[in-house]
Amino acid sequence: MTSDFPAPHTILIHGLGRSRHDMWLLARRLRRLIPETTVHVFDYHSRRIPLSAAVEQLNAFVGTHTRGEPVSFIGHSLGGIVARALDLRGDTAAPLKRLVTLGSPHQGALIARVLNPYRPIRAIFGPVLGDLGSLSLTETPNQLEIGCVVGALNSRWGFVPLFREDNDGLVLAREAMLATSADTIHRPIFHGLFPFSAQAAELSAAFLRTGRFPQ
């Protein structure tokens, strides 16, 4: 661990169909676990805008709230993808340090590909559903050091047997992994409960401090 960590600012990013209110408990826990960092919660209309627009809004948020100081992120589901996409565009409003993804579908989401052809579903979840179904982000990060928390039961069936492979109830375990991540850890956390999990908060705080998850 170096004096550069944790970063002076940490931004929490909610997932698809969620809001900043879903991140309040995680924010509260992080303020206790890593008081050296200022915790911010980024809110965006995840069901109304494509991924590219969410990235633009996040970059503007970074510029407004960090005063150009280094920033790390914790992203739940889609939130982790938004942070990765910001990193890959290169011209960020502040230096980027670390990212913890909580159940983020780095390899694209099977569930999104299944649902996207249905117009009523697209009307509910918006254009980002198509982005998640055909995700093609470059694997190698630009600035970010990435840690992946994967929801999994380490079983054939996972939380939802219909998927026929390990999953967190929405995202397949293999979809939530990234070959170029600094560290990956599997924990039996249901997808929708990541922001409310004390274990997820503790794992995130450890990675933001050290770049590794406690085993």
Image (cartoon, rainbow, N blue to C red):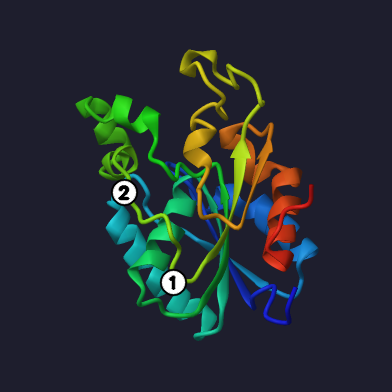
| Amino acid identity at mark 2 | Ser
Q: Which residue position is annotated with label 2?
A: 136
Q: Residue 107, relative to residue 45: is it above or below? A: above
Q: How far apart are marks 2 and 1 (CA)?
A: 24 Å
Q: Residue 135 carries which label?
A: none
Residue 122 in the image, given as x and y percentages of width and height:
26, 33
Between residue 9 and residue 155, name the one nearer to us: 155
Q: Is residue 50 left or right of residue 62?
A: left
Q: Which residue is drawn at 66% across and 38% down?
A: 186
Between residue 34 and residue 125, name the one nearer to us: 34
Between residue 44 and residue 33, name the one nearer to us: 33
Question: Which quarter of the picture shows residue 167?
Answer: top right
| Amino acid identity at mark 1 | Phe
Q: Residue at x 43, y 41 (%)?
A: 17
Question: Which quarter of the picture shows residue 5?
Answer: bottom right
Q: Which element is circle 1 on?
A: helix
Q: Residue 137, relative to residue 96: is it above or below? A: above
Q: Which residue is drawn at 38% across and 40% down?
A: 108
Question: Which quarter of the picture shows residue 166?
Answer: top right
Residue 76 in the image, given as x and y percentages of width and height:
54, 48
Q: Which residue position is annotated with label 1?
A: 61
Q: Which element is circle 2 on?
A: loop
Q: Which residue is drawn at 31% across and 39% down?
A: 129
**Where's the N terminus, which quadrant?**
bottom right
Q: Is residue 7 left or right of residue 16?
A: right
